[in-house]
Image: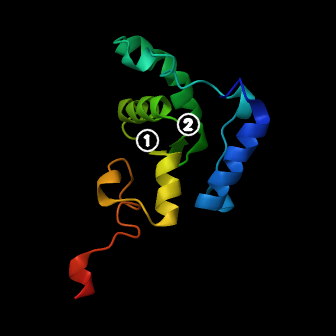
Amino acid sequence: MRKTLGDPVADDLRYIVKAVVGEENFVDMTPNKSNNFCCGGGGGFLQAGFQEQRRAYGQTKANQILATKAEYCITPCHNCHAQVHDMSDVNDHAWETVHLWTLLNLSLGILGPNEREYLGKDLKEVDVFHPESAM
């Protein structure tokens, strides 16, 4: 998507993210949109078994994320999510990784307790109904 659909789609995604997390919480990467760096996990590389090579290539993206000093990195696809999450482990959990789909569902109040595995501690309990608290 990054190169194929270009900046108009990147702008649409930024609009959605800002609407969900608040514009004041949005931190863009440099470079961004069509010129953004690949995470290194796509095209089957994530499943190919070359973990050291994948992580070496992904370090460019990790350095880009680290430069933002953001607490979260929002990812749009499964491969990006798995790669960026893995890179946060390699970089001693310098950021939390969250899928855009997860944030959308969280903002709508429909994210189930079992769908919160990758949320940071600050978001794990957002809008979770606890039956014992209703008593």
What amino acid type is highlighted by mark number 2? Ile
Inspect this view and state whether residue 37 appears.
yes
Residue 30: image tag: none
Image position of 120 (left or right of 130): right
User: What SS does tag 1 mark?
Assistant: loop
41 vs 7: above or below: above
Say which quadrant the N terminus sits in: top right
Tell me the residue at 66%/56% (across/down).
Answer: 18
8 vs 108: above or below: above
Q: Position of residue 65 (x, y in %)?
A: 55, 36
74 vs 32: above or below: below
Q: Position of residue 50 (x, y in %)?
A: 37, 11
96 vs 7: above or below: below
Q: Position of residue 130 (x, y in %)?
A: 27, 74
Residue pushed farthest front? 110
Tell me the residue at 38%/31% (across/down).
Answer: 86
Inspect this view and state whether residue 71 appears.
no
Tell me the residue at 63%/52% (across/down).
Answer: 17
Q: Position of residue 28 (x, y in %)?
A: 67, 44
Residue pushed farthest right? 8
Labels 1 and 2 touching (C-beta < 8 A)? yes
Look at mark 1 in the image and give the residue it sits on.
94
Query: Reading the chain from its start, which is encountered first: label 1 or label 2?
Result: 2
Look at mark 2 in the image and give the residue it sits on.
65
Residue pushed farthest bottom? 135
Image position of 116 (left or right of 25): left
Q: Spatial distance from mark 1 to mark 2, Cα to Cα?
A: 9 Å
